[in-house]
Amino acid sequence: MSVPEPKPVESPAAAVDDLVPAAATGVLTIDLDALAANWRKLEKTAVPAECAGVIKADAYGCGIPQVARTLAAAGCKTFFVATLSEAKVARTALPDSAALYVLDGFFQNTGEDYAEINCRPVIGDLNELAEWDMFCRRTGWKGGAAIHVDTGMNRLGFTPTDAQGMIPRIQSGDHGITLIMSHLASAEQLNSPSNARQLSLFREVASVFTGVPAALAASSGIFLGAAFQFDMVRPGAALYGINPTPEADNPMQPVAEIKARIVQLRDLARGDTVGYGGTWTARRPTKIAILSAGYADGYFRAASSNDGTRGADVVIAGLRCPVAGRVSMDLIAVDVTDLPPKAARRGHFATLLGEGITVDELAHHFGTIGYEVMTNLGRRYHRIYKGGTAAAKS
């Protein structure tokens, strides 16, 4: 991925300072209207398939309750989480009619927990299925479950042969299966041959699950075309503004913005170094701003700079400023020498994510992917939810 050269960006007129407590050192703003708009765009792209919502990992760091309520208000009726504990949080925020699936499988002696909150396990092998069936026979529970088939990820799921062995069960009618699903391994690569292989295999398996809805595509898979969309798509990353089409422009709106306070301004002489290890050296008289965030807040150490490599940028007063030296646990130094006089002030905010700095750009500097950036959003930030409904923000 190519990262644009630093350039001026438009800065919002409203100051963040007045919206947060004076003691807040950083602010994470979640745009619920952008989240809902992203879901609607994905829904439109996938018509006539149902568009579900993946809200695992605390809704990619954005907050399960707020995200669940927002998506439900937008029209989303089916949700996916990773664990039963996440499902318990999600259920408190969702209408009783919403279908809620737990992706990481079914564990013995947890059936009562599923029944209590009316959620459905995604079952991935014969042992899980036997344990689920035993619970359902013993209790009469009719809540349903999904079957996960492994078509090439080699992670979770029934083998295609085992899945096809369920034909007699499906033909019996009272099978309790509400969804058949698989997961693409290389959906973000448009020309990957594995996409066609997995599609062919899943189509073959799904065809024997007569009357059972089928789901293959997550965020990137939606953009592979109608053949991959089946009866349901289940986007996660794209909902939160991560680019599902890395070979093209991002069709999604940004959802998260991060700001950190400037805690100190320092003047350096030529030859002075900054940060642990002294890896960054001032090559001229330099002004440095120290920001109150670091890798403990999910701003990875890999975004650091040194005398040979430029690191990430932040935005102060509408202009990009480069990180100077190593990112530490709680602090980041940035070079603000080229800003107009008094543009950087103690107590004001710098933008770490937003104002033109995208989650995918940060991921590039962090040496990772947008998923990891979002799921590591720090818990020390003061959170603001904007847009959406009052109920969604609570």
Image: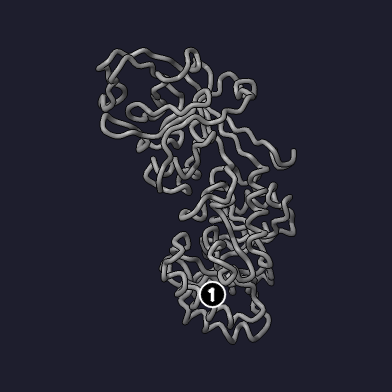
* Residue 164 visible in the current orientation: yes
Left or right: where 55 falls relative to 298: right
Q: Nearer the viewer, residue 84 or 90?
A: 90
Query: What percent of the width, then of the height, locates residue 80?
Result: 59, 58
Local crowd size for mark 1, using a 10 Å CA cut-off: few (<14), some (14–19), many (≥20):
few
Colouring of the image: one colour
Q: How many marks?
A: 1
Q: Residue at x 41, y 36 (%)?
A: 5
Q: Nearer the viewer, residue 288 or 9?
A: 9
Q: Is residue 364 above or below residue 286?
A: below
Query: What percent of the width, then of the height, locates residue 165?
Result: 52, 84
Mark 1 lies on residue: 130
Q: Is residue 320 above or below residue 339?
A: below
Residue type at mark 1?
A: Ala
Q: Residue at x 55, y 65 (%)?
A: 217
- The quadrant of the picture occupied by the C terminus is top right
Q: Nearer the viewer, residue 393 or 10?
A: 10
The quarter holding residue 283 reads top left
* Residue 136 visible in the current orientation: no
Query: What percent of the width, then of the height, locates residue 255?
Result: 59, 42
Q: Mark 1: which secondary structure?
A: helix
Query: What percent of the width, then of the height, locates residue 173?
Result: 68, 83
